[in-house]
Image (cartoon, rainbow, N blue to C red):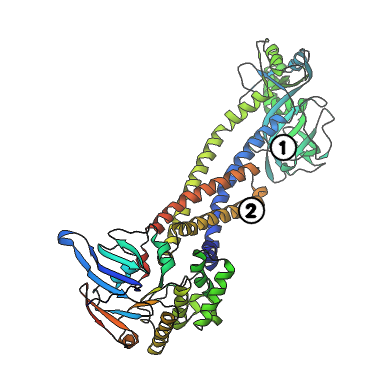
Amino acid sequence: MNLAARDIRHHLGRFLLTAVGLGLLLGVVLSMIGIYRGLVADALGLVRSPGADLWVVETGTRGPFAEGSRIPGDTRESIARLAGVTEAGSMSFQAFEATHGERKLRLQVVGYEPGRLGGPPEIASGRGVSRERFEIVADEKTGLRLGERLPMGTDVFTVVGTTRGAVSSGGDPVVWMSLKDSQTLQFRLAPAPARREAERGAAATATPDTINAVVARVSPNVSAESVAEAAERWKHLSAMTQEQQETILTRSVVEKARQQIGLFTTVLLTVSTVIIALIIYTMTMDKVREIATLKLIGAPDGRIVGLIVQQALALGLIGFSVGASLIVSVKDHFPRRVVMLPEDAAGLALVVIVVCLVASGLGVRLALRVDPATALGG
Amino acid sequence: MTETSPAALVECRGLAKHYGEGDTRVDALKAVDLDLRPGEVVGLVGPSGSGKTTLLNLVGCIVEPSAGVLRLDGETVWDGRWLRPDLRSLRLEKIGFIFQFHNLLPFLDVTENVALVLDMAGASKEDAAARAQELLDYLEVGHRRKAKPSSLSGGEAQRVAIARALANRPRIILADEPTAALDGERAGIVMDLLRKVAVEQSATVVVVTHDEKIWDRFDRIFTLRDGRLVGSDGARR
């Protein structure tokens, strides 16, 4: 006869309400983990989108995602000629705020050479950029539809394709355009300052052929490290493998966010432990007379400990299920991506079990100290 | 004169209990000699603080005696120390308890309250349920077998508590004010039941009570005063 189940059923409403409350707390813990995973996925999504093996950037910098990197536009041709390189493409990256109708759109603009490495990884609808000018491929998160026109800088661009789930590490949706357009967007001055600059000399108004990085694929028979070494013989360039680039992002760019979220998650788990311990202690306090009666009629300690520990576990696991279901059902409505991995959920479930066992310690201690004589008398 | 019997179910020899030491020492029970035979229903009476509940706790192996010898059903359980390491299994095996406020577990229904004792003793689910039903029918509360304790009347709850006390067929039944919460008629019914059990199961029933209405139902009445057994009267016979 399972006493814990019977007691839960007896106080079902109160128990479920408590479990739901705990579930909300555990849901926040789970969402924190999911937000961090989303942060990493977003950050890595953009760096993985070109499908490159090698990133060539300005010497002394760690690439366009960590800091500013400016290299000459003809670098791509030099890199493409290195032994082992099968493909190369020039890329530019910039944050941009556009106005679409009534609303402001924060965008991550990626410039690439159509037909070369660096374009959108997968087109959800429409097509890729095929002309040199005034076409963009926008992520669905921008809210832009095929054929829509978006003014950016001094030009107006037409949406010819869309992608799904492509955002920067800051969560801004990505827009791809030709390298030429992105350079114009980045460097061409508005008419008034352009006129002023023109008076100072015509050269100042020309759009410089500057890019942020060159991405390259290397032959499967050649190591990316050896190509990086070769690229670094040019003193004005630094080169890093895809793996190094990803490490920079996860260890440097999102590291503080990871620590922040990790600390917050720890605090929440500690709060959960205290709450579970208090709930279980209170539930045990309410049952002191029943526990004394059980001891008096001969129930062994194992049975009484089982009653408390099983209730603590039930509380934790029901709470976890409520929290997990809640987060799974609302995660797509979060402004930033929330990635729920089965191993994270399983890990948290395990932590919840441990937390419940630890938290039930107070209740168990109280129960074991109950004097059976308490059952006698009024 | 101390009565002795080789067949006594409860034997106390010089059984004593004190709390504290030196100036703070309180003698709750002083060297009690007692023999209770099978089939007897005995009353423990006396003013509050006289040691009735202490004696019940000692016989029920709930509280450790300070001195003396205690034998239950022929087995010496205390002789300066507990001779059984697991007192709860001893209680489960030999003793049934009936409480003033019945102490039924509120989260179990009537049948489960009775079957729990058998479940703890290792009986199968079916056997436990069958025995519980048999006892509930015997005590005329079988029709309430699925009810929760909160929906029972005082008399019904006390009969269920008696069924639980009898479930494992103990030969010693200790009752603490079992009729205190009942009116005269229901108190009489409960005492009749306890007598029936004592006779049919050859058990000893010890009842701690202040309720003078039921004194004529006892075979013997033991009076305690200031921790001493000051009298033993044959009430019924």
Q: In this view, does B80 lie above or below B60?
A: above
Q: In this view, does A346 lie above or below A374?
A: above
Between circles 2 and 1, the one closer to the viewer is 2
Q: Residues within 10 Å of mark 1 (few under 14, many from 20)?
A: many
> Which residue occupies 83% across, 26% down?
A115
Q: Position of residue B233 (x, y in %)?
A: 26, 84
Q: Can the viewer see residue B141? A: no
Residue that numbered label 2 is attached to: A325
Residue A238 numbered mark, or none? none
Q: Quadrant of residue B218?
A: bottom left
For mark 2, name the chain: A
> Which residue occupies 40% across, 57% down?
A368
Disc 1 marks a residue whose amino acid type is: Ala
Q: Residue furthest bottom?
A: B185
Residue A166 numbered mark, or none? 1
Q: Position of residue B66 (x, y in %)?
A: 25, 62
Q: What element carries label 2?
A: helix
Q: Is residue A323 left or right of residue A176?
A: left
Q: Quadrant of the C terminus of chain B?
A: bottom left
Q: Position of residue B108 (x, y in %)?
A: 52, 70
Q: In which quarter of the image is residue A364?
A: bottom left
Q: How crowded is mark 2: few (under 14 residues within 10 Å), some or many (20 or more)?
A: some
Q: In this view, does A216 lie to the left or right of B161?
A: right
Q: Earlier in the sequence, mark 2 or mark 1?
A: 1
Which of these two is toward me, A34 or A188? A34
Q: Where is residue B21 in the image (x, y as percent from the top left)?
A: 19, 59
Q: Can the viewer see residue A115? A: yes
Q: What element carries label 1?
A: loop
For mark 1, name the chain: A
